Image (cartoon, helix red, strand yellow):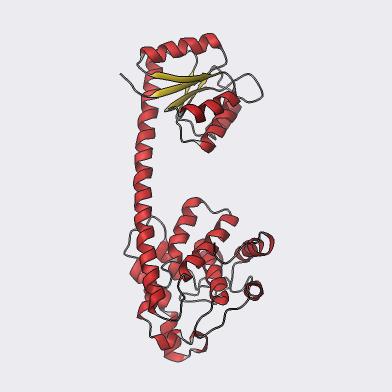
């Protein structure tokens, strides 16, 4: 006996009734039925079905594809479309909602059962994979926070909470630029360890980075490479080590350690460079007073197109000048 709850969305009551009978014969529970799109959305929320059988063509203002799209945007419910039409326009629109499959009417009980079981199985597997990734991400997050705490305790080059503030700014810029949640997550993690190798840097060098020359300057400028060497051995699902390696590169190629330029620099590294600069300028240190946010914004703007990616700078300006963003949440 199947315990899964099925929701049927069909505007022809005779067809709906026959379909419900077939599902019950197969051992499924009918948790609800709907005949129009807005009703389907309400019942999807109220009844939490395990799967939805959605007729593409529905009466009323909203067809099944639009209803499915709205349901997908709110709930993680697998969807199987039912249709008597093979119109290519319908099919192309339907693909955007990522259904499991399509049942072309009339279909038999064997087809119905096979499609439902495969959809439920894949949904279960996808959920298990997502849960494992979430647990892995949580583990990475905890580890990164522990590293950032150790770095901040090392000396005067960072203040407590520095990495969290950089992360807040970087994540805001990333979302303003339309980066995916996955890329933004990787960037958020990279912000907590971008300067991990500085824990081995002599404090006297960190106290005067703007006045360094000769061997001390070379030693300091090697920290992105050293941080890369530490992180490269970890099999992250994001290019964390390369983000860290490239965050001191400049858009015009004048940065370090490799002198790459433009879009050869990872977008996450280009964002991190701006976020670090904003946080560094607006934070109080033993060796440096905190500048007002306006001063930091002016400094970033002055280096637009040279040190910093113009698109990243523009996104940063929109956040702080137009949307009232702050340097920490």
Please name whichever residue, 114 or 157, is drawn nearer the observer in this view of the structure.
157
Please name whichever residue, 247 or 300, is drawn nearer the observer in this view of the structure.
300
* Residue 139 visible here: yes
Q: The C terminus appears in which quarter of the rendering?
A: bottom right
Establish if 41 lies above or below 212: above
Q: Horizontally, is 199 left or right of 297 in the view? A: left
Q: x and y percent of residue 4 in the render? A: 37, 24
Please name whichever residue, 46 or 14, is drawn nearer the observer in this view of the structure.
46
Q: The N terminus appears in which quarter of the rendering?
A: top left
Q: x and y percent of residue 290 in the render? A: 57, 79
Q: Residue at x 35, y 50 (%)?
A: 135
Q: Quadrant of residue 262?
A: bottom right
Figure disc tally: 0
Q: Horizontally, is 206 left or right of 90 in the view? A: left
Establish if 189 lies above or below 126: below
Q: Residue at x 59, y 30 (%)?
A: 66
* Residue 269 visible here: no
Task: Farthest residue to the bottom: give it.
Answer: 214
Q: x and y percent of residue 45 in the render? A: 51, 31
Q: x and y percent of residue 198 in the render? A: 39, 78
């Amino acid at each position: 006996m199947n315990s899964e709850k099925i929701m049927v969305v069909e505007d022809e009551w005779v067809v709906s009734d026959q379909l419900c009978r077939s599902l019950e014969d197969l051992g499924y529970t009918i948790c609800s039925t709907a005949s129009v799109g807005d009703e389907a959305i309400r019942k999807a929320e109220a009844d939490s079905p395990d799967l939805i059988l959605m007729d593409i063509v529905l009466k009323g203002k909203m067809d099944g594809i639009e209803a499915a799209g709205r349901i997908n945007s709110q709930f993680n419910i697998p969807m199987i479309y039912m249709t008597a039409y093979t119109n290519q326009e319908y099919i192309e629109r339907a693909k955007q909602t990522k259904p499991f499959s399509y049942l072309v009417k009339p279909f038999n009980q064997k087809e119905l059962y096979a499609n439902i079981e495969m959809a439920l199985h894949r949904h279960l597997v996808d959920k298990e994979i997502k849960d494992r990734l979430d647990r892995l991400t949580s583990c990475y997050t905890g580890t990164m926070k522990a590293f950032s705490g150790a770095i901040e305790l090392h000396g005067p080059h960072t203040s407590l909470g520095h990495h969290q503030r950089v992360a807040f700014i970087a994540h805001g810029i990333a979302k303003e630029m339309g980066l995916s949640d996955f890329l933004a997550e990787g960037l958020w993690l990279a912000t907590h360890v971008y300067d991990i190798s500085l824990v081995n840097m002599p404090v006297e060098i960190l106290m005067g980075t703007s006045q360094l020359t000769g061997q001390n300057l070379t030693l300091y400028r090697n920290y992105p490479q050293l941080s890369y060497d530490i992180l490269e051995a970890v099999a992250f699902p994001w290019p964390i080590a390369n983000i860290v390696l490239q965050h001191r590169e400049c858009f015009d190629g004048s940065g370090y350690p490799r002198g790459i330029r433009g879009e050869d620099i990872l977008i996450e590294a280009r964002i991190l460079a701006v976020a670090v600069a904003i946080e560094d300028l607006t934070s109080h240190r033993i060796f440096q007073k905190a500048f007002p946010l306006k001063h930091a914004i002016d400094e970033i703007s002055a280096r637009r197109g040279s040190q910093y990616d113009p698109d990243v700078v523009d996104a940063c300006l929109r956040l702080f000048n137009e949307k009232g963003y702050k340097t920490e949440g």
